[in-house]
Image (cartoon, rainbow, N blue to C red):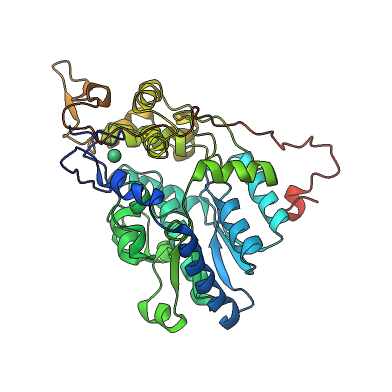
């Protein structure tokens, strides 16, 4: 397997990487733009764009911001509402894998930013049937989350005639350098299908025989082109306009608003996915079984590029976390009503033969590992000088209430007095 000589990404990254003559990947090369672009000018472009929507919006709302109980939601809302003065409608798709902490982060998000909030909770039974089907088709138990999160804001934009949707980072830019920050790439149905949904749209999953008739999947269907054009719906990504640094952004939100963080089973990043029971747990373990690497590689690669972590420190973290067993596997199996063998046999069919093989005993073994690939040879441009000597992720104070506390009104009205 070819690995990047700067970050830790392997060539089989599902979003696709290319490598230059120094063995440096396209994600690392595009990331260099973060230290080269005139971000002041980019933010002026953003201000100009936002003000156009603020003054012309036919709706009560100036824009839609998709939110979760984690992952940059506080930062995006803070930027758009408090810094630029727009009135956003917050839109939330419930993934059914929620942690208490995620619910609290959402309740405090509504409270601190005083925004209107729309949440969609689909039938538990449909979510289960759909999860089983996407496990069989793509070894994914997260398809419904990605599909719902990427389509609900578009439905809301069409329904309420709110043309502007504001997203955080475009993963194709941030991870693999699929586009330059200068390309101004925007939300598209094609990117959603090809990458977020692993080539599978809801239409492809309709099957009466599997208990998934079309009417059950309608919430996941993309709105018609004509409806999108009529309203003029577009989705922009803030990382095209601001130097994106999710760690620094989360730390600002911890200090200003008490955003809650938590230790994760399979990565050192305690900020990004604290709203989900299984994202950095079983979901990530399945990613490891498929591609031979997990979120810890994503997070270490990001920190290496941001010059807070050396490549060897990153490799140590990958070695520590990559094979950790998922803590929530039994919870998931019980929820879906399947056993572990069924799950693993289903996922085994999707192991990438570029990195996995079966040894003589019939056990799965990795063909290669990132720690066998160090700097050297013609990789003299690979190594970045560190700009911070430590890369630490905080655990912030829990806001878990005492249930007797009178102020605990989370369930009653969905926000915190
Ligand atoms: Zn790289």
| Residue positioned 27% across, 31% down in the render | 292
Number of callouts in the render?
Answer: 0
| Rendered view: 69 above or below 51 | above
Left or right? Give the position of 111 relative to 173.
right
Q: Which residue is farthest top?
A: 361
| Residue 272 visible here | no
Q: Which residue is farthest left?
A: 360
| Rendered view: 162 above or below 207 | below
Q: Quadrant of ligand 1?
A: top left
- Residue 5 in the image: state x and y as whole percent: 24, 33
| Rendered view: 362 above or below 69 | above
- Residue 365 in the image: state x and y as whole percent: 22, 22
| Residue positioned 27% across, 56% down in the render | 199
| Residue positioned 56% across, 46% down in the render | 249
- Residue 79 in the image: state x and y as whole percent: 59, 58
| Rendered view: 58 above or below 266 | below
Left or right? Give the position of 406 relative to 359.
right
| Residue 244 visible here | yes
Left or right? Give the position of 45 relative to 371.
right
Left or right? Give the position of 32 relative to 128.
left
| Residue positioned 15% across, 41% down in the render | 21
- Residue 242 in the image: state x and y as whole percent: 48, 56
Judge by depth and name the residue closer to the eye, 379 or 269: 379
Judge by depth and name the residue closer to the eye, 381 or 101: 381
- Give the quarter of the figure containing the N terminus: top left
């Amino acid at each position: 397997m070819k690995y990047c000589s700067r970050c830790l990404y392997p060539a089989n990254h599902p979003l696709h990487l290319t490598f230059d003559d120094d063995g440096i990947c396209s994600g690392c090369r595009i990331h260099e733009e973060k230290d080269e672009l005139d971000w002041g000018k980019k933010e002026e472009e953003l201000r100009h764009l936002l003000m156009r929507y603020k003054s012309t919006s036919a709706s009560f709302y100036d824009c839609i911001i998709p939110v979760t109980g984690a992952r940059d939601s506080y930062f995006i809302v803070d930027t758009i509402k408090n810094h630029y003065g727009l009135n956003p409608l917050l839109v939330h798709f419930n993934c059914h894998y929620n942690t208490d902490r995620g619910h609290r982060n959402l309740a405090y998000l509504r409270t601190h930013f005083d925004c209107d909030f729309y949440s969609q909770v689909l039938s538990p039974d449909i979510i289960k049937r759909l999860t089983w089907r996407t496990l069989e088709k793509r070894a994914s138990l997260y398809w419904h989350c990605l599909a719902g999160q990427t389509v609900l804001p578009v439905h809301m934009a069409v329904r309420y005639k709110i043309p502007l949707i504001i997203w955080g980072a475009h993963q194709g830019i941030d991870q693999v350098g699929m586009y330059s920050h200068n390309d101004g790439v925007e939300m598209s149905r094609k990117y959603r299908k090809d990458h977020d949904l692993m080539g599978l749209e809801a239409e492809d999953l309709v099957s009466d025989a599997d208990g998934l008739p079309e009417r059950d999947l309608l919430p996941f269907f993309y709105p018609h082109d004509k409806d999108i054009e009529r309203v003029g719906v577009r989705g922009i990504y803030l990382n095209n306009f601001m130097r994106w640094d999710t760690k620094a952004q989360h730390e600002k939100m911890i200090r200003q608003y008490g955003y809650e963080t938590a230790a994760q089973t399979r990565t050192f990043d305690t900020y990004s996915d604290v709203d989900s029971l299984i994202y950095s747990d079983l979901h990530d373990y399945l990613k490891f079984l498929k591609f031979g690497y997990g979120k810890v590689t994503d997070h270490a690669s990001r920190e290496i590029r941001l010059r807070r972590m050396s490549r060897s420190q990153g490799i140590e973290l990958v070695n520590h976390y990559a094979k950790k067993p998922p803590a929530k596997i039994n919870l998931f199996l019980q929820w879906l009503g399947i056993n572990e063998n069924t799950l693993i046999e289903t996922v085994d069919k999707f192991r990438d033969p570029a990195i996995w093989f079966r040894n003589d005993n019939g056990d799965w073994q990795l063909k290669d590992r990132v720690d066998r690939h160090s700097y050297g040879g013609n990789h003299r441009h690979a190594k970045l000088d560190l700009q911070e000597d430590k890369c630490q992720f905080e655990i912030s104070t829990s806001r878990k209430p005492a249930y007797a506390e009178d102020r605990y009104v989370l369930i009653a009205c969905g926000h915190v007095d």
